[in-house]
Image (cartoon, grey):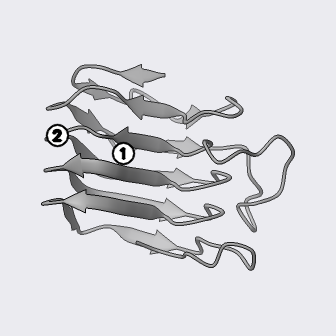
């Protein structure tokens, strides 16, 4: 689902999309409030990696080439076959109060300038094949 304006979760989300991110932030200067809810992908609750149909695009939240995006917890992003949250080519992104758990690669993968990642928790992310881990 493409996020183009300020948004908030209103309940737990189970993502069944294959080959694409669950939430794709495609606009600058927006806030996504997890509102205390969870986002769960299709991967194994033990390893974050099992399951068929995995591709490099199955992240929980993707933020590519945007400015001023905020993702605010509390909330959990878990069991995605790749990264829980990926921030790439973006500036001024602020991720706070989010828990990432049991994602096959990184809990939060960050590439960009002037981003703030604070007060987050990362548990049991990565795998033997992708030992990325937390943030």
- Identified at 60% across, 42% down, the residue is 57
If the image is split into quadrants, where does the C terminus sit?
A: bottom left
The residue under label 2 is: 67
Which residue is located at x 12 percent, y 60 percent?
Answer: 114
Lateral position of residue 63 relative to residue 11, left or right? left
On the picture, is 62 further left or further right than 128?
Answer: left
Residue 122 is left or right of residue 48, and the answer is: left
* Helix, strand or loop at mark 1: loop
Q: Is residue 115 visible?
A: yes
* Image coordinates for residue 97, horizontal then vertical, percent: 27, 59
Q: Which mark is residue 94?
A: none
Identify the residue at horizontal 14%, vertical 32% (top origin): 29
The picture quadrant where one finds residue 119 is bottom left
Pick the residue in front: 28 or 47.
Answer: 28
Residue at 52%, 42% in the rendered image: 39
- The image shows residue 52 at horizontal and vertical percentages of 87, 45
Tell me whether the residue at label 1 lies in contact with that at label 2, contact meaning CB atoms closer than 8 angstroms: no
Residue nearest the observer in this picture, 81 or 112: 112
| Image location of residue 130, percent across then percent down | 67, 72
The residue that mark 1 highlights is 36
């Amino acid at each position: 689902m493409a996020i183009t304006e300020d948004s908030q979760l209103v309940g737990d989300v189970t993502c069944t999309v294959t080959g694409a991110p669950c939430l794709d932030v495609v606009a600058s200067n927006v806030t996504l409030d997890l509102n205390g809810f969870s986002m769960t992908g299709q991967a194994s609750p033990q390893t974050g990696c099992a399951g068929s149909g995995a591709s490099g695009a199955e992240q929980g939240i993707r933020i590519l080439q945007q400015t001023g995006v905020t993702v605010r917890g509390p909330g959990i992003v878990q069991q995605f076959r790749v990264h829980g949250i990926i921030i790439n080519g973006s500036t001024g992104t602020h991720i706070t109060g989010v828990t990432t758990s049991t994602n096959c690669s990184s809990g939060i993968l960050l590439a960009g300038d002037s981003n703030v990642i604070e007060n987050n928790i990362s548990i049991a992310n990565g795998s033997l094949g992708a030992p990325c881990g937390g943030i």
